[in-house]
Amino acid sequence: MKKLFVHFIPVVISFIWLITECQTFNPITLKGPDFLKFYMILVLGFYLSVFIVKLLGEKFTQTTFYFLMGIGALGIIKLIWGIMLGKPVGFLTMILIAELIIAFLLMGWTSNDQRKQ
């Protein structure tokens, strides 16, 4: 439950920013720069919470990977939406590639934790 709360904090913060700055609750409808700000707050906050959990010596759970998949799915949906509209999606593509690399690193850490037991 504690891990769920720690991972939920960046989601709440990013949605509070979304509501106060953009007056919407739907991040898909945002234009490029606003979506990138929202997405960076979400991604950086989530990975900060992941590293805090790791530094506290806790193990990664399925909840961590569900949050990771949800954030990645949001980015991929927006990427497809931008491609369909013919908009430039270079920064989002770079963020998604970096997110994919970090996800593989997290999976490697998880498998190492399981081997130690």
Image: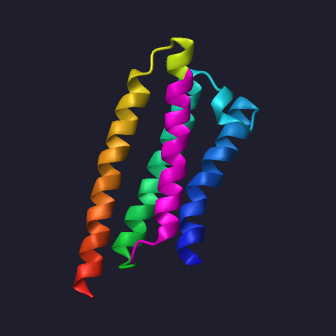
Q: Is residue 6 above or below residue 58?
A: above
Front-most of residues 61 and 30: 61
Q: Quadrant of residue 24?
A: top right
Q: Is residue 74 left or right of residue 104?
A: right
Reply above or below: 54 against 16. Answer: below
Look at the magenta stretch and give its main secondary structure: helix
Number of marks = 0
Residue 68 in magenta stretch: yes
Please name whichever residue, 18 or 97, is drawn nearer the observer in this view of the structure: 97
Nearer to the camera, 76 or 10: 76
Q: Where is residue 13 drawn, in percent x and y? A: 62, 51
Rendered image coloring scheme: rainbow
Q: Is residue 5 left or right of residue 60?
A: right
Does the magenta-highlighted stretch encompass residue 69?
A: yes
User: Residue most toward the top?
Assistant: 86
Taking the spot 27% from the left edge, 57% from the top edge, the residue there is: 105
The picture quadrant where one finds residue 57 is: bottom left
Quadrant where the N terminus is found in the figure: bottom right
The part of the chain drawn in magenta is: 59-81
Q: Residue furthest bottom?
A: 117
Name the residue: 61% across, 46% down: 14
Across and down, in percent, residue 6 comes to 54, 67
Please tell me which residue is depicted at 39% across the width and 29% down the height of the picture. 93
Look at the image and tell me in which quarter the C terminus lies. Answer: bottom left
Return the x and y of residue 28 as percentages of the image width and height: 64, 31
